[in-house]
Image (tube, helix red, strand yellow):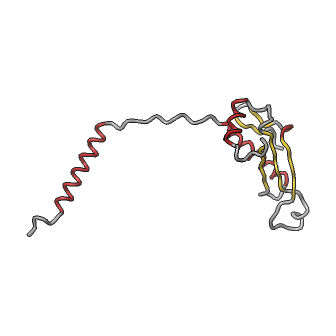
């Protein structure tokens, strides 16, 4: 592999907690594709890991609840013909999923007030536009 996969800061995916499974990729291919196990499935026990800080782990379990099966997060990769590249793709995908799921919630948006001058100008322009349109009606023409 291409070294440790950093989630965020100094938190890294521990290689010992990653479970790899290989199988044959589906779809078209040459002579070699049908005989090699190039599809990669990477599993990470999110519920049982000690690698993540408790707050991050709680956040990730909550946000990834729909993707978890018995607390285990699973990622598949079969885009590349080489198993090695699929392994790297799966690991990067898992790391980015965890980074996104453990990110702190965004700060709440503070409602801003519209300055009175802007509102008054808008109302004045609406009034003026209405006068222009009223002047177009052909009531006085006879």
Task: Residue at 82%, 59% (x, y): give it.
Answer: 81
Task: Residue at 88%, 64% (x, y): give it.
Answer: 34
Task: Residue at 78%, 47% (x, y): give it.
Answer: 74
* 76 w.r.t. 64: above or below: below
Q: Depth check: 74 or 30 in front?
A: 74
Asked if residue 49 lies left or right of residue 65, the reply is right
x, y percentage for residue 25?
A: 83, 60
Q: How many marks?
A: 0
Q: Depth check: 115 or 64 in front?
A: 64
Residue reaching furthest to the left:
142
x, y percentage for residue 109?
A: 49, 36
Asked if residue 66 lies left or right of residue 33, the reply is left
* 114 w.r.t. 128: above or below: above
Q: Depth check: 83 or 103 in front?
A: 103
x, y percentage for residue 128?
A: 21, 51
Asked if residue 28 lies left or right of residue 105, the reply is right
Kindly indicate the quadrant of the structure image that contains residue 2.
Answer: top right
Kindly indicate the quadrant of the structure image that contains residue 30.
Answer: bottom right
Task: Residue at 65%, 36% (x, y): give it.
Answer: 103
Residue reaching furthest to the right:
35
Residue reaching furthest to the front:
70
Kindly indicate the quadrant of the structure image that contains residue 142.
Answer: bottom left
Q: Quadrant of the N terminus?
A: top right
């Amino acid at each position: 592999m291409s070294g440790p996969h950093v989630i965020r800061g100094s938190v890294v995916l521990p290689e010992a907690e990653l479970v790899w499974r290989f199988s044959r990729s589906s779809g078209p291919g040459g002579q070699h594709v049908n005989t090699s196990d190039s599809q990669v499935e990477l599993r990470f026990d999110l519920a049982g890991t000690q690698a993540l800080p408790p707050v991050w782990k709680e956040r990730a379990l909550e946000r990834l609840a729909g993707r978890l099966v018995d607390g285990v997060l699973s990622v598949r990769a079969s885009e590349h013909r080489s198993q090695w590249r699929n392994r790297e793709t799966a690991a990067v995908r898992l790391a980015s999923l965890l980074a996104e799921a453990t990110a702190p919630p965004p700060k709440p948006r503070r409602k801003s007030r519209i300055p009175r001058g802007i509102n008054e100008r808008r109302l004045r322009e609406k009034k003026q536009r209405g006068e222009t349109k009223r002047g177009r009606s052909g009531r006085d023409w006879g």
